[in-house]
Image: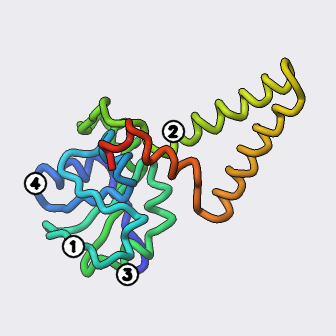
């Protein structure tokens, strides 16, 4: 099997109530900790190749992410780890919430690491521009440095800022 069959949130909700599916959340642990569908099993996409899916499945398997894009882009990888029928939640967690289905939320969990990187990078770039305009043009280098770091992260897949933020005290609980 190289594809996943889309399933609508209402159909998934009914099948979950009947205990007919295993729901697999492929988002990262920090995303899962903040918000997830009740009964979902966390199997982050970044750790998928560390071994076969080691979960006991009840009937069919349904994969999901936040919007459905990550799941759709990795259909073949995900389907390769399942021996039977495999599905993907159409529209992901966003569609699930739009259908007024219940989610488990922990507002005390730290923001997702990706959002923390976006906030920190945005603030550093903005600070560099403001300081460059008001204090001294040399501060523009801060914005350039952060921009170069973001470019490197996008090209290489390794983000130094994400690694620094991951060890910050407020993120240790999620780890």
* SS class, disc 4: loop
Within 10 Å of the Cα at label 1, are there few (<14), some (14-19), or many (20+) other Cα atoms? few
Q: Of circles 2 and 4, which is in front?
A: 2
Q: Position of residue 145 (x, y in %)?
A: 75, 45
Q: Which residue is drawn at 59% across and 39% down?
A: 118
Q: Where is residue 83 in the image (x, y as percent from the top left)?
A: 26, 81
Left or right side of 53 for 64: right
Q: Of circles 3 and 2, which is in front?
A: 2
Within 10 Å of the Cα at label 2, are there few (<14), some (14-19), or many (20+) other Cα atoms? some
Q: Of circles 4 and 1, which is in front?
A: 1
Q: Please give the residue where the numbered disc 3 appears in the rendered image.
A: 1
Residue 15 found in image quarter: bottom left
Distance in Å between CA atoms under marks 1 and 3: 19 Å
Distance in Å between CA atoms under marks 3 and 2: 37 Å
* SS class, disc 1: loop
Left or right side of 150 for 48: left
Left or right side of 88 for 21: left
Q: Residue at x 59, y 62 (%)?
A: 157
Left or right side of 19 for 77: right
Q: Please give the residue where the numbered disc 2 appears in the rendered image.
A: 116
Location of the N terminus by quadrant is bottom left
* SS class, disc 2: helix
Of labels 3 and 2, earlier in sequence is 3
Name of the residue lying farthest toward the right: 137
Which of the pair 37/51 is nearer the observer? 51
Asked if 126 appears above or below 36 in the picture, the reply is above
Q: Please give the residue where the numbered disc 4 appears in the rendered image.
A: 18
Q: Please give the residue where the numbered disc 1 appears in the rendered image.
A: 54
Residue 109 found in image quarter: top left
Q: Residue at x 43, y 61 (%)?
A: 71
Of labels 2 and 1, earlier in sequence is 1
């Amino acid at each position: 099997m190289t594809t996943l069959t889309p399933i609508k949130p209402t159909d998934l909700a009914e099948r979950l109530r009947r205990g007919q599916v295993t729901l697999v959340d492929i988002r990262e642990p920090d995303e899962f900790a903040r918000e997830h569908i009740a009964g979902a099993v966390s199997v982050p996409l970044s750790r998928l190749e560390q071994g076969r899916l080691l979960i006991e499945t009840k009937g069919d398997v349904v994969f999901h992410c936040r919007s459905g894009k990550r799941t759709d882009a990795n259909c073949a990888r995900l389907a390769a780890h399942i021996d039977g029928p495999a599905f993907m939640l159409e529209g992901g967690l966003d569609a699930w919430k739009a259908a007024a289905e219940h989610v488990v939320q922990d507002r005390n969990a730290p923001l997702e690491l990706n959002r923390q990187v976006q906030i920190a990078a945005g603030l550093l770039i903005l600070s560099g521009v403001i300081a460059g305009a008001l204090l001294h043009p040399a501060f523009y280098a801060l914005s350039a440095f952060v921009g170069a770091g973001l470019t490197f992260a996008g090209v290489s897949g390794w983000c130094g800022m994400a690694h620094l933020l991951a060890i910050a005290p407020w993120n240790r609980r999620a780890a």
